[in-house]
Amino acid sequence: MNPEKFHKIMKKIVILFSVIWGIFLFPSILIMSFLLTNTLEFANQNEAVRQVLYYSLMSYPFILIISISLSWFFIWKKRYWAAIIISLIPLLNLFIELIAVDIALLLA
């Protein structure tokens, strides 16, 4: 594959993730407190699960901002694979939240 074409494809992938995370950023800030109160009541049986949910929900908007910024920084430095990996970090936070909710359901 032509390296120039490959770089364009990588840039388009980073643009796609930036748009997706940018769309999620504003609602995540608005409904963070609503989700936080409901999940903390939901997971009141286990202190560890409650803390994981609390920190993952509170950090999510900041992770989105950092992920978008760092992915564009790595695109600017022409480190395309690093930009893709950095742009996937918010998915890790979502998986942690899902696992914590599953554990809370199992313990309830």
Image: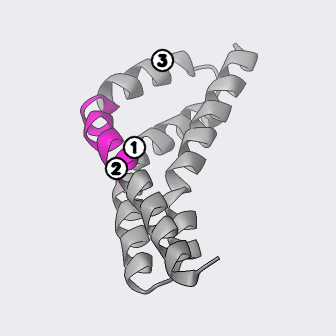
Image-based side of 26 in relation to 48, left or right = left
Find residue 31 and report its image quarter: top left
Q: Residue at x 38, y 48 (%)?
A: 21
Closest to the camera, between mark 1 and mark 2, is: 2
Q: Is residue 25 above or below residue 8?
A: above
Q: CA distance from mark 3 to mark 1?
A: 16 Å
Asked if residue 104 lies in the magenta stretch, the reply is no
Q: Residue furthest right?
A: 106
Q: Which residue is mark 3?
A: 41
**Closer to the N terminus: mark 3 or mark 1?**
3
Counting from the top left corner in percent of width and height, residue 73 is at 38, 77
Look at the image and tell me in which quarter the N terminus lies: bottom right
Label 3: how many residues lie within 10 Å, few (<14), some (14-19) or many (20+)? few
Q: Is residue 76 above or below residue 33?
A: below
Q: Which residue is mark 1?
A: 58
Counting from the top left corner in percent of width and height, residue 42 is at 53, 16
Q: Main secondary structure of the magenta part?
A: helix
Callout 3, which amino acid? Glu
Callout 1, which amino acid? Met
Q: Residue at x 57, y 82 (%)?
A: 3
